[in-house]
Amino acid sequence: MHDTISGDSKLDELIYLSMLYDFYGDLLTDQKKKVFEDYILNDLSLSEIAEQLNISRQGVHDIVKRCTQELKDYEEKLSLFRKFTKIKQMLGSIKDLCNKISENGDLSKLQDIEMLADDILKEL
């Protein structure tokens, strides 16, 4: 197992890498996917993965590091995760505005919904 996660930033990084993997994992080679999944998603140690693949612990570490950088590079170039997150937040705002309209019949919120919808369309 990994060392104990120290602090929120380490956990946030693991969550971020997992999300990037969801978006870009298929762009990695099969070996990189296997190592990354075992280390990040399955929480195996470098030593456990090295033993399974019959490679050095340092080799596994290097693969994880390269995968991490590749996934971040894909996000930097394509921004799919950033766009997804932004659109998800805007859709949440639309849902909140719809609930407010339902609760009090304030149709002035429709203009806000229209603006958010326009912003979403610009992101796509």
Image (cartoon, grey):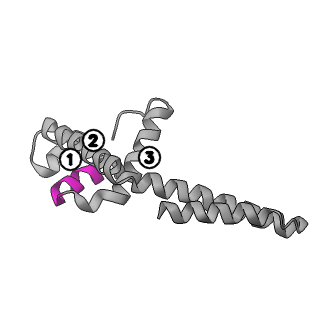
Of all residues, the one furthest to the right in this rendering is 104
**Any magenta on residue 118?**
no
Q: Tag on residue 49?
A: 1
Residues in magenta? Answer: 29-38
Please name the residue shown 9% across and 48% down the image: 54
- Kind of residue at disc 1: Ile
Q: Nearer the viewer, residue 59 or 70?
A: 70
Question: Quick check: 4 above or below 19?
Answer: above
Q: Tag on residue 45?
A: 2
Distance CA(mark 2)–CA(mark 3): 17 Å
Q: Are marks 1 and 3 in contact (CB under 8 Å)?
A: no
- Kind of residue at disc 3: Ile
Q: Nearer the viewer, residue 32 or 47?
A: 32
The secondary structure type at the circle numbered 1 is helix
**Any magenta on residue 31?**
yes
Image position of 115 (left or right of 53): right
Looking at the rendering, which quadrant does residue 47 occupy?
A: top left
Q: Are marks 2 and 1 in contact (CB under 8 Å)?
A: yes
Local crowd size for mark 3, using a 10 Å CA cut-off: few (<14), some (14–19), many (≥20) = some
Distance CA(mark 1)–CA(mark 3): 20 Å
The secondary structure type at the circle numbered 3 is helix
Residue under pointer 3 = 15
Please name the residue shown 26% across and 50% down the image: 36
Check the picture and name the quadrant holding the N terminus: top left
Can you give x and y, in whole percent of width and height, for residue 105 in the image?
88, 69
Please name the residue shown 31% across and 58% down the image: 24
Q: Nearer the viewer, residue 91 or 14?
A: 91
Q: Earlier in the sequence, mark 1 or mark 3?
A: 3
Image position of 68 (left or right of 8): left
Distance CA(mark 2)–CA(mark 1): 6 Å
